[in-house]
Image (cartoon, rainbow, N blue to C red):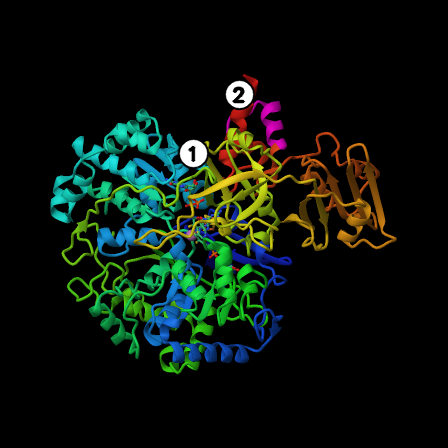
Amino acid sequence: MNDAVRTTCPYCGVGCGVRVQSAAGGWRVAGDDDHPANHGRLCVKGSTLAETVIDDTRLRQPMMRPHKGAAHAPASWDAAMARVAEGFGRVIEAHGPDAVAFYVSGQLLTEDYYVANKLMKGFIGSANIDTNSRLCMSSAVAGYTRAFGEDVVPVEYSDVENADLVVLVGSNLAWCHPVLYQRLSRAREARPDLRVVNIDPRRTATCDIADMHLPLAPGSDVALFNGLLRYLHDNDCVDQAFVDAHCRDSEAALDAVARGCDVASVARDCALPEDAVRAFFALFAERARTVTLFSQGVNQSSSGTDKVNAIINCHLLTGRIGRAGAGPFSITGQPNAMGGREVGGLANQLAAHLSLDDAAHRALVQRFWQSPAMAERPGLKAVDLFEAVHEGRVRAIWIMATNPLVSLPDADRVRAALERCDLVVVSEAVNDTDTLRCADIQLPAATWGERDGTVTNSERVISRQRPFRAPPDEARPDWWAICDLARRLGHGDAFDYPDAHAIFDEHARLSAFGNGPDAEARRVFDIGGLAGLSRADYDALEPVKWPVPARPAPEPSRPYGDGRFSHPDGRARFVPTVPRAPANSPSAAYPMILNTGRVRDQWHTMTRTRLAPTLASHRPEPVVDMHPADALAVGVQAGRLARVSTPWGSLVVRATESGEMKRGEIFVPIHWNSQTASDARVGALVNPVVDPVSGEPEFKHTPARVTPFEAGWFGFAMARHAIPVNDVPWWVRVQGVSFNRYELAGLEPPADCAQWARSLTGAPRDADWIDFVDAAHGSYRAIWLVDDRVEACVFIAPRADLPARNWLAEQFGKQRVSGADRAALLAGEPPRGADTGPTVCSCFGVGRCTIVDAIESKGLTSPAQVTDLLKAGGNCGSCLPEIRGLISEAVTVAE
Ligand SMILES: Nc1nc2c(c(=O)[nH]1)N[C@H]1C(S)=C(S)[C@@H](COP(=O)(O)OP(=O)(O)OC[C@H]3O[C@@H](n4cnc5c(=O)[nH]c(N)nc54)[C@H](O)[C@@H]3O)O[C@H]1N2
Ligand SMILES: Nc1nc2c(c(=O)[nH]1)N[C@H]1C(S)=C(S)[C@@H](COP(=O)(O)OP(=O)(O)OC[C@H]3O[C@@H](n4cnc5c(=O)[nH]c(N)nc54)[C@H](O)[C@@H]3O)O[C@H]1N2
Ligand code: SF4
Ligand SMILES: [Mo]
C-alpha cells in the first residue's frame, strides 16, 4: 500500500493505526503495521470501516427551522451561523454567559476540542462546556486527580503484556478493546504464567482468557478493593519505602479498612465465595507486576470515584506504579477521550491539565490566551447541564459529535429539555439522529476520512487523523464552525486559525507554558516538543507518546517513574474509601438490576456501524439478557418479546438467555435508537443519579421489572428498498448487504395478511407476488420477484420461531432464483445443510452451524483448528471466545 493514507480508527480508545487506499468503487482499509497500538492488526469494526463511508446518510448542508415543530429547510452556512451567533449573543447579553452552553464529545479531534474549550472558558467567560466523557471516564479523571494531583494515566499497553497479573475490573475488553485484548491474549500464550482475573457481575466473552472470574454483586467493588488493601497490609505486602518517600495519608486509608474488611466480610458484601476472594487476594499479593485495568463497571457508578481510588490505594501501598508491568490503568473508551482531557474539555477543568479552581492557573491561561473574560468557576456537568436547560437556566446550547437523546440517562427528560430550549444547535455527520431531530439549527460536520488533526489514545499516544477524501457538499470541520462563531461574537483575532495545524501548535505551546521542573504550574502533560512543527512535519507526524517536553529527558520518561507525583509536595495521596450501596436498590415493584453496556460489533448510537452489513450479523437485534430462572419466574420466553420497565421509562425487546447473567440481574445493550428500532432506547430507562465527586451517571445499576410483551403475531420483512415500518407497533431494522431487514411484531395480526404485506412492501398490483396462507397455523409467507430476482419477502406467524434469516439473506445475492429455491423460499425452509446459522465470525462471515458441523464431523478440539479449516477467528480474533464455547459445548454433548 504505497499511496495509502495513514490515519487512525475512529472507534475505540485503543487507537489503532489504519491505512486507507482507494479501491474499485470505494476504499480499502487495512491495519497500519507501523502503528505502535496495533502493529497492523484491526478488530472487525476497524476492518469494516470501508463499508461505512457512505454519502447517502450524511448531513450535507446546514438546515434550519423557523420555530419548534416546523420542518427543517436547507440554509447557507452564512445564514445558519448568523442565527447561531445572534441567538448566543442575545442570550449572553440578556442572561449572562452562564445561560449558554456547549456539549461536546470525545469523538472530536483535539484541535476541535481545543477551540471549543477556549471559546467558552476564555472568551464567552463561562465553563458551561461539558462532554460525553462525563458519562465515560470522569470518575477515573477525578480518582487520578485526587491521588496524583493531575489526571495522568501512568500505564501503557506494553505494561499489560509484561505484567504477571492483569486484573480486569468492569471491563469487557474482548468486545470493547479487541486489539488490546488480543495483545493480552497473545502475551498469555507466550508466557503461560501470566494470570488474568476478570471482575464483572456478568460472565462476558472476556472470561475466555481469565484464570479467575469474580462475578461480584453489582456496585460492590469498593468493598472488594478495601478488603484487598487490608489483606496486603496484613500480609506484609507493603512497600514501606515507597509509601514513606512518595505518599501521604496511608494511615487514614488503612484505618478505614481496619474494621469489617476481612475476607469473610468481603465475601459477604460482594456475594462471592470466600475461597474465591482469598485466592484473588493471594494472587495479587504474590505478583509485583500487576496491572489493574478498569473501565465502565468501575466509572459508571454512584461510587465510581471511590472505586477508582480504592484500586489506586492498593497500587500505592505496594509501590506498583510508575514501573514497567504495573499500575492502575483506566482504559479510555472513545478515540479521543484522552485528547479531551488534555484540552480540559470537562466543565471542571481548564486547558492543558491546569485547574479551573486555581486562581494562578486561571491567570496563566488568561495570559496565554490574551482572553477578555475567563470562567471563574466550574460549569455544569452533563446531567446537571441538561437539567438546567429543562429549567430554562441555560437557554442556548450547541451539541457537537454526540447524541445525548440516546446516551444520557433519563433520556426522555433530555428530549423534553431540548424541546423547551430557546436555541438548540447540533453539529452532526449524519442526517438523522434522535438529537438532530430536536435541533433548531443543524450543522453538517466533516467526519472520519475527511477530518484533519490529532487524537490521543489510552496509552497517551498522539496520532494524526488524516483525510483521504473531501467532505461531501457543505460539510465542514467542527473547528472551523466554532471559530466562525468566535469571529461573529467579536473574538476574531484569537480564533484566526488557517488550519488545524495552527491550532495544534498553540495547544502544544500552552502545554509548555508555565511548565517545567521548577515552574509555577508544573505538570506531567507537556508536549512542548511538538510546538513549532512546520506544516509538513505536522502532516508527517509519527505516533508519539506524551510527555514530549521541549528539552527531552535522556530516557523516555514514564509518568511518576521517579516517584514524584503532581501534588505540590510531590506526594501521591491515599484516599480513604467507604463502600456505599448503589443509589437505588431493587424493590418489590422493580426487583431486578438493569445493567447496560456494549456489544462487540456496534458502536454507540450506531450512526456509523449501522451502515455496515458485516457488523449487523453478530448481534442483529437489541435484547434483554437474563437468567433462565428469572425468565421462567416472570413468564418470559427466550426469543419472544419482553417489556423492561424502570421508574424512568420502558422498552420492548426480545428476551435472550446467553448464560452470562446471574439471577436478579439483566443486561440491555446501549446502541439501538429511534432510527434502528421502535422501542429500544435504553437511555430512557436509566436512573439519572450521579457520582457526587465526578458527576458520572450510574449507567450500570437501575432497578427494573421485566414482563412478557404478549405479541399476537411475529414477522419479518426483507426488501431491497426501504419500507415504511413506523405504523407497525414493534420493529427493528437490520442492514443487509443488498437489502433491509425488518423484524416485526404486533398485538392483533393483520386482518388480511396479503393486502397488508403488499401495501407494506409497496408491491404493485401486477407484481410477481407468490404467497401462501397456512390457515391451520395462522401463518402467511410471500415473495415478490422482479425479473426472477427476489425484491422482497414477508413472513408472518403467531409464534416467534420464524424461518432462518441468514439463508433468506443469501437469496438476495442471487441474480435469479431457481425453481428449487422458489419452493424453499416459500416454505421458508432452506434446503438441507444450506443454512449456515447466525454469524459467529463477522470478518469471514462464518455461521454457527458451519462451525458446529466442522467441529462435530472433523472432531476439532481447538480454535486454531477451526481457523485453519474455515478461516473463522483468523482475522481480528474477536470471535475466538465464542468458537471456544462451541467446542466445549460439542465436547459436553459428546460426553
Ligand atoms: N464494540 C464496542 N466497543 C466499544 C464501544 C462501543 O460502543 N462498542 N464504546 C467504547 C467506549 S466509549 C467505552 S467507554 C468502552 C467501554 O468499555 P467497557 O467498560 O469494557 O464496556 P461496557 O459494556 O460498558 O461495561 C463493561 C462491563 O462492566 C460490567 N459491570 C457492570 N456493573 C459492574 C460493577 O458494579 N462492577 C464491575 N466490576 N463491573 C460491572 C458490565 O457487566 C460490563 O461487562 O468501550 C469502547 N469500545
Ligand atoms: N445506558 C448507557 N448509556 C451510556 C453508556 C452506557 O454504558 N450505558 N455509556 C456512555 C459512554 S461511556 C459514552 S462514551 C456515550 C457515547 O454516546 P454518544 O456520544 O451519544 O454516542 P455516539 O453515537 O458516538 O455519538 C457521536 C455522534 O457524533 C456524530 N459524529 C461523527 N463524527 C462527527 C464529527 O466529526 N463531527 C460531529 N459534529 N459529529 C460527528 C455521530 O454521527 C454521532 O451521532 O454513551 C454513554 N451512554
Ligand atoms: S480495537 Fe478495533 S475499534 Fe478499537 S481502535 Fe482498534 S480497530 Fe478500531
Ligand atoms: Mo465511553
Nearest the camera: 156 or 778?
Answer: 778
Q: In the shown orientation, is residue 771 left or right of residue 225?
A: right
Q: In the shown orientation, is residue 829 left or right of residue 841?
A: right
Q: Disc number at residue 892?
A: 2
Q: Amino acid at mark 1?
A: Cys
As drawn, the residue found furthest toward the right would be 766
Q: In the shown orientation, is residue 280 left or right of residue 67?
A: left
Whole-percent x and y of residue 828?
A: 75, 36
* Picture residue at 23% right of the left edge, 45% below the top: 321
Describe the element under mark 1 as helix, strand or loop.
Answer: helix
Q: In the shown orientation, is residue 700 left or right of residue 70?
A: left
Q: Amino acid at mark 2?
A: Thr
Residue 280, by quadrant, is: top left
Nearest the camera: 564 or 721?
Answer: 721
Whole-percent x and y of residue 627?
A: 50, 32
**Magenta span of residues:** 849-862
Say which residue label 1 marks: 207
Marks 1/2: CA–CA distance = 19 Å
Please say whether residue 264 is visible from this viewpoint.
yes
* Disc with the residue nearer the chain's start (1 vs 2): 1
Q: Quadrant of the C terminus?
A: top right
Please say whether residue 18 is visible from this viewpoint.
no
- Vertical order, 635 against 28 (above or below): above
Please check the rendered image and state whether residue 861 is part of the magenta-colored stretch, yes or no.
yes
**Magenta-drawn stretch, dominant element (helix, strand or loop):** helix
Are the residues at dot 1 and dot 2 in contact (C-beta closer than 8 Å)? no
Residue 701, by quadrant, is: top left
